[in-house]
Image (spheres, rainbow, N blue to C red):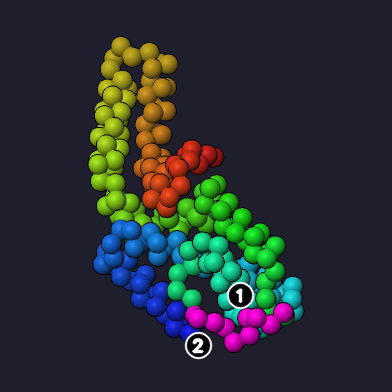
Amino acid sequence: MDYGFARVEQVIERHKMTLGELPPAKVLGSVLSHFNQEQVEIAAQIIALEKGTASESVEVFLSLASQLARQGVEMGELPDKGLYTDMPIFRVDPDRVDQVKRELDAHRQQRSLEFRAAFENDLAVQGALRGLFPADYQALLDERDKDEDAASDVLLAPGSTDAQRRAARKTLEGLGNRESDWYGQKTQEALGNRPIPAARRA
């Protein structure tokens, strides 16, 4: 029951985020805990299937999530305890806990599709990052506008060579990715990691 109430509270919190009613740092912390919970729920379901306890996957989730929280993983509010999480059939072994933690770290460090969907493509998170780094965001816009104007001038100039025009088109094509890359780098910075290189695009 406590687990169900926690999920309802997440929905309410998400609604507040959409309306812009939460401080930027709170938004990022909330999205991180929601992301981690979703990934841990998937891992718990797999573990529960392996244990033959799929109908009690909540107990496995609580065992896994509580151990991850003790290792410093942001899991948000968890019930004080499950009814049976200490029973061997539901308890997740430390090695498996470490594996899930490595998977969560990989999502964040490698900017997986799931991580990017939760952070870089989320309007509430984007607004929070702009609020946390207003000067940096303005600098991004100024630089982008400057490069766009310069590239457009090259394309329109009668004396531009074919090579210059190709370079200008390439610059214009890349401008659309700059903001997305900025959100990715600032997400890492805001979450306490050093910024990592922009994700490679096809």
- Regarding mark 1 in the picture, which secondary structure is present there? helix
Q: Quadrant of the C terminus?
A: top right
The residue pinned by badge 1 equals 63
Which of these two is toward me, 34 or 87?
87
Name the residue type under label 1. Answer: Ser
Q: Is residue 150 left or right of residue 32?
A: left
Residue 108, placed above or below residue 54: above
Q: Is residue 67 in view?
A: yes
Give coordinates of residue 9: x percent, y percent.
39, 78
Residue 141, placed above or below residue 118: above
Q: Is residue 59 left or right of residue 18?
A: right
Residue 27, placed above or below residue 139: below
Q: Which mark is residue 49?
A: none
Which image quadrant for residue 53?
Answer: bottom right
Determine the CA span between mark 2 and mark 1.
16 Å
Q: How many badges with numbers are in the image?
A: 2
- The answer to whether residue 87 is magenta is yes
Which image quadrant for residue 158?
Answer: top left
| Chief SS of the magenta region | loop
Q: Is residue 123 in view?
A: no
Identity of the residue drawn at 39% across and 75% down: 11
Query: Which portion, as a residue range, is magenta?
Result: 79-88
Identity of the residue drawn at 45% across and 43% down: 194
Name the residue type under label 2. Answer: Met
The residue pinned by badge 2 equals 1
- At label 1, counting other C-alpha atoms closer than 10 Å, the crowd grade (few under 14, some 14-19, many 20 or more) is many
Which of these two is toward me, 41 or 160?
41
Mark 1 or mark 2, which is nearer the start of the sequence?
Answer: 2
